[in-house]
Image (cartoon, rainbow, N blue to C red):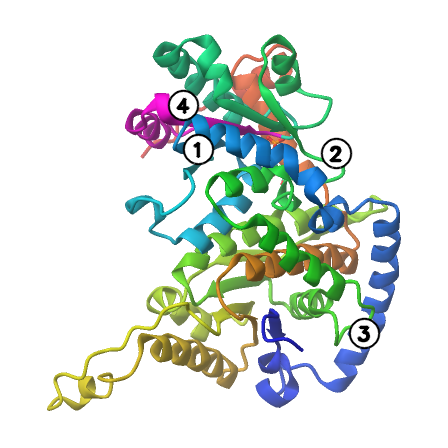
Amino acid sequence: MPDSQVRLDFGFCTAQGLGPNGLAAADLEGLSRELARVHQAMAQERAQDVLGFWSLPAMGEKELEPMQAQARRLAGLADTLVVLGIGGSALGATAVDMALAGFLRHAFPRQNGMRLFVADNPDPRAFGQLLEGLDLKRTAFNVVSKSGSTAETMAQFMVALERMEKALGHEEAVKRVVFTTDPEKGNLRLLAGRDPYACLEVPPNVGGRFSVLSAVGLLPLMCAGHDVKALLAGAARMAERCEGAGLMDNPAYMFAALAMHYWRAGRNILVMMPYATDLFGLAQWFAQLWAESLGKAQHRDGSPALVGQVPVAAVGATDQHSQLQLYMEGPQDKLVCFVSLDDYGREITIPAMFGDIDALAYLGGQTMNKLIASEAVATAAALAKGGRPSLCLRLPGLDADAMGQVMFLLEAATVAAGHMLDIDPLDQPGVELGKKLTYGLMGRKGFEDQAREMEALDQAGRYLV
Ligand code: PA5
C-alpha cells in the first residue's frame, strides 16, 4: 500500500488497546453486518446519482475549464478574492486554504495566487473592517449561494456591490463578480439575467456541506493558487477505497461504525483534534458536516428520531492546555478523533541549551516534530488508560492530495453514519424556522405571520438583570 494514503488508526477503540470500553471481535462482526446493509443502500444511492458529491473527484478538463477560465480572468483584474458565502458555501474553501497556505496566511504576502478571504458572517465589525482594508479596484468577489436566497450572503453582496460601484462604476464592478449557484434557479440567476455576471454551477444533487470539490470550493482554491487537480486526485483515490464493501477495508465505513458504536454507548460528543494548527479549518468544516447532516428529529420514514452526535473542533497540542482536562476526567461521553501528520513538511530542532537544568535540558537537540508527535500519542494513551476511546486519521503530510483524501473520507463516513441512524444526512429542515423568523423580523414580504409571532415574543428589557 503506498505511503501517501490517509489511514484510519483505531487501535485505541479496540478491546486490546482500550480494555473493557473497546470493541471486541463480536462488536466488529455486528458492525460488519450492519455496514454490509449500509453498503447496499449507498451503492444504490450512487447508482441513482443521489450522492452527487461522489462523482465530483472524477471531474475532467471539460468540467474544470469554466472554473479555470474564471480564475484566469479574475487574476487579471484583481489580487484579492473575497468569497461571500456561509455554511457549506464557505467552510470547505477555508479548510483547504488554511491547511495549504497556513493558519497565518493573512499575515504574510502570498507566494503565488490571489489573497483569499472567506467572509461568512454578516457581522458589521468584521465585514466592515475587511471591506475598508481592501483596495476594491484590485478585489474580486465570488458570491457562493446554491439557493441564492441566503440573507447573510445576499446582504454582504449588496453592501460589497454598492462599494465597488462607487469605486469603479457599475460595469467594472459586475466584471469583478462571479456567482456560484444553482444552474437554473434562484436570485443570483435572476440578477445574472439583468447584468452580465459570470456564473458557475453548483450541481443540483450536491448539497452545500458536500460541495467543497465542486465549483464552490474549487474556484476560490484555484484563485488562491492551490493544486486542485491533486485535491481531486486524492479524493478520487479515497472514493475508490470508500466503495469497498468490507468494514476492514473501507475507512469511511470504519469511521462511521466507530462513531455510531460509541454514540449508542452514550458518547454523545465527537471531538476532532488535529495535531496541526493549520488543520483547525478541517475540524470546523467537519463540525458542520457532522452536525447539520446527522442532527435530525425524524427517521427516513417520518417517525421520531432526535439523534445526532455533537462535534467539537479542537487543536493539539494547544487544547491540551484548555479542553483536555475535561476529556480526561469529565463525563464518559466523548470519542476523540485525532488527526496526525507523518510529515510536517519542515523540521525545527530545539537548540541544546540550559544543560544544567534537567527539566529543560532533555528538550535540547530534539525536534519540535518529535515533541508534537509524542504529545499526540501520549494524549491518546492517557485517554485510553482512563477507558476513553480515540481514533486517529493519519495523514502522510499536508498537501492537496491528502486534503482531498481526508475530506472525501469524512463526507462518505457522514452518509454511512446517516444510514446507521436511519435519517437523511442530505437535508437540513431544522435551520428553516430560524430563517423564516429572521425574514419576519427583517420585514420580508410573505413573512407577516412570522413578524407578528416575533412581535408577540418581544420581551425587550423585561428580563434584563
Ligand atoms: O450545508 C448546507 O446545505 C448549508 O450549510 C448551506 O451551505 C448554507 O445554508 C448556505 O446555503 P446557500 O449556499 O444556499 O446560500
Q: Which residue is drawn at 39% across and 54% down?
A: 102
Circle 2 crowding by C-alpha within 10 Å: few under 14, some 14–19, many from 20: some
Provide the secondary structure element on which disc 1 rests.
Answer: strand
Q: Is residue 407 shown above or below 148?
A: below
Q: Where is residue 394 in the image (x, y as percent from the top left)?
A: 55, 72
Percent x, y for residue 279? 46, 58
Residue located 38% across and 15% down the image: 163
- Mark 2 / mark 1, whichever is N-terminal: 1
Which residue lies under the disc numbered 1?
81
Q: Nearer the viewer, residue 20 or 40?
A: 40
As drawn, 152 above or below 418: above
Q: Could you tell me the amino acid type at mark 3?
A: Ser
Tag of residue 204: 2
| Label 3 residue SS | helix
Distance from disc 3 to disc 1, alpha carbons, whole Å, reads 46 Å
- What is the C-alpha distance between the residues marked 4 and 2? 42 Å
Instruction: Say if residue 339 shows up in the picture.
Output: yes
- Mark 2 or mark 4, which is nearer the start of the sequence? 2
Quick one: label 1 or label 4, which is nearer the N terminus?
1
Residue 95 located within the stretch drawn in magenta = no
Q: Name the residue under label 4.
A: 460
Cα distance in 3D space between marks 1 and 4: 40 Å
Identified by mark 4, the residue type is: Ala
For label 4, the crowd category at 10 Å Cα-Cα, with few meaning under 14, some 14 to 19 and many 20 or more, is: few
Of residues 321 and 140, the one nearer the viewer is: 140
